[in-house]
Amino acid sequence: MMTRRWWLAAIFLPLAVLTAGPRVGVVYSDWPDGKKSFFAEFDQALAELALAPEKMENTTLPELSRRLADFDLIIATSVANYSHTVDMSPHAGEWRDYLNRGGMLLVVDANYASVLNDWVAKIGPEFAVATAHCAAHVVKTPASRAVTVNNHPFLRTPRDLAATLTVKSHWAHMMSIPDGWERLITCSDGEGLLLLKTVGRGLVVLCSYAQMSSVDGKAAAGALLENMLFWHQFQQQGLQVLTLDKGTDLVGPSAFNLHMQGAPESLASLAVELTETAEGQEPRKHSAPAQVKGDHATVTLPLPAKARGRTDWRLALRRGDDRLATAEWQEDLPPVVAVALKRKHVYPRNRELEADLTFVPTPAEPAAAELRWRLDDQPATTQPLRSRQHRQTVAMTGLPEGRHLLKTEYWADGACQGQAETEFFIHPQPLYEVRSDGVLMEAGKTFFPLGFYHVSWTFTPAQRQEMATAVAAAGYNTIHVGIKGDEKNTTSYGDFLDACAANRLRVITEFGCPAEDVIAKYRRHPAVMGWNPGDEPAARGITAAEMFQRYDRFKQLDPNHLAYTVICIPAQYGRYAGGTDVLAPDPYPMPKHDVDDVFHRLQEARQEARKVDTTVWAVLQCFGGYGGWTRPPTPQEFRAMTYLALLAQVKGIIYYTYADNSFSLPSSPELYHAAQTLPAELADLLPMVMDGHFELHAANADRVYVGSWIMNGRRRLVIVNADKEKTAPFAYEAREPGLPAVLYGEAMEMRRENNLIRAEIKPLERIVLLE
């Protein structure tokens, strides 16, 4: 981890404080149940700024209020005042004084009355902000998650805060916002997700986004802190930044522009110095005095053509020899040619290589531009370019198995302006591959994985084997298990795989010891179906780039089996979909949410996965009794989620879990019985799911979902009522005379009216009909 040295200077602070940097207090709660889940939420971001915070549980907020003079910044972490909520009314004056004299307050996860009403609003009526569920949570569509970013300098300097925040999910927004707050980011409802308020020489930032220690939150945490501290420097000088443009991010001449407002004496004799250090080059300095007119000042610094690659920038606001404010940032200008392959590892069914090319030449448009590409050292193909975004399809006919290069060149004005080489691999026919419609093929035959997780780390090999035996006996064909670290140099895991093969169980493995060693040892075992490169990487700090690298290593080691990746954050489906064979979302809605969350999340995942030829399986909930999942699903919910997943057109289902540290399926007899009987119920439907013609007739029609599959002249219809309480009517157009056969469930008052079949369906029921 690179540690940033402290670079902020605020003249109102004593010299000793300046040397140490701002004094930071972090407030957390013990949620849930004393586990203090967000105790370390900002640790990495603060460490990168070389700041050592003092941490305080929210129960000590009254004491903190009396010590506010000891701090420059207070951070309220996610759910900071949620448990053992403290009413801050008695301390309103202390917080107003703290802010007016230059203190800062950052509140993330500003989605609860416990922090907004019981803390922030108690500072004064002008701070009273309300919160409510957002369309992103209620409607749950990509459009409902869209946000609007205000063109505000707080979002841009020194870090691109908007870019780091808006990749995160949000479920609530801030509303009823008094005058004096600036809405920096708003949701599709037009309400606030990021608010800024200046208070004297201090400031308050309220942020609806939460979980700043997640993979998509760490960058946001750092950007929030750096931008707040940068903004604060200007406030300490009595200055307000109106606009700040760091210059174009394209290659070529540009300009840095700063526009400030303040009292004439605050603006007098100001100058800006900008230092540019391109990688491998000597620093270049640019400086200019501020041009003052009344209470406004502007600075413009012409910048020559920028270098491609990484450049470090340092900004200093000066008055004579005194540095009043500084900031540092990095800029990475792209190469002339960038290539992204749809799939890097290709198989006999892939007759063509698909590449997305991005061209970033100098700003001046060339008279004529060409793309020249070749495979390995074959003759080049030349074609005109009419856009800086180009998709190229390349035939791979005649190429042997192994490593190959796609070589691309951008030509303009008679010369090559830039080039790129991109490797890809051609593999022989694998044991497992994904058909173009997402269906899994096993040795050339269609296969629908239906199975269970076993979180193996605290269980003995014998207990793991008991699970596998029970799962196979119920008719499941797939299990997801872990190989423990102490099994690396024993025959234990091989013995387990042998038993699985005897029971016709396919195994997906996650790793408690080095993955490459395990893959090399067991890649030829007949029970192996695939490998898990890292569970829920989007929530565990594993970037999409790292997962792509793992996928690449796994496929080079073992092109015969699948890479399987679980993503728990819907906004991240698209980022991770290209670095796996199987994208497996794990929506766990019960009991707080609705069963049809499963349908919506899986449909979203499928939209993203189809863009990169990745299939989608569902990881469905079969656990409860801990954390936010206070009970396991009922048998009705278990079946409803299963059929909703099939209606969302998934091509595999793995249930979480048969057992983990806190749950054992056999200890929930009714759910266990439902799980044991499900494979037989699905046996005749799954072949149609793989090879039949599917049609979705109704999706959320008064909470009812209807779909059908047709194969070999027969049609099976599935109807699911996602409502927890209400019986609902449904209807569909019949293909055959008479009434259909009811295979499973209860179709109440089923009747025929002309060509329509009508009936009613109970809450959380599933009905399977046969025509």
Image (cartoon, helix red, strand yellow):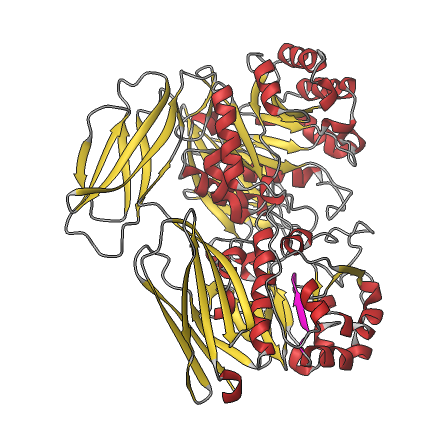
Front-lying residue, 558 or 170: 558
Image quadrant for the N terminus? top right
Q: What's the residue at 53%, 37% (across, down)? A: 546
Q: Tell whether 174 sits left or right of 396.
A: right
Report x, y in % for residue 571. Answer: 52, 49
> Along the line of sight, which residue is nearer the eye, 682 or 437?
437
Q: Residue at x 60, y 35 (%)?
A: 619
- Count of marks placed on residues: 0
Q: Which residues are magenta?
A: 102-110
Report the front residue among 30 and 588. 30
| Residue 155 in the image: above or below residue 478 | below
Q: Is residue 561 left or right of residue 476?
A: left
- Magenta stretch contains residue 106: yes
Q: Residue furthest front?
A: 321
Residue 245 placement (x, y as % from top left): 41, 68
Indicate whether 37 appears above or below 640. below
Give yes or no for residue 98 being in the magenta stretch. Answer: no
Q: Is residue 302 left or right of residue 751?
A: left
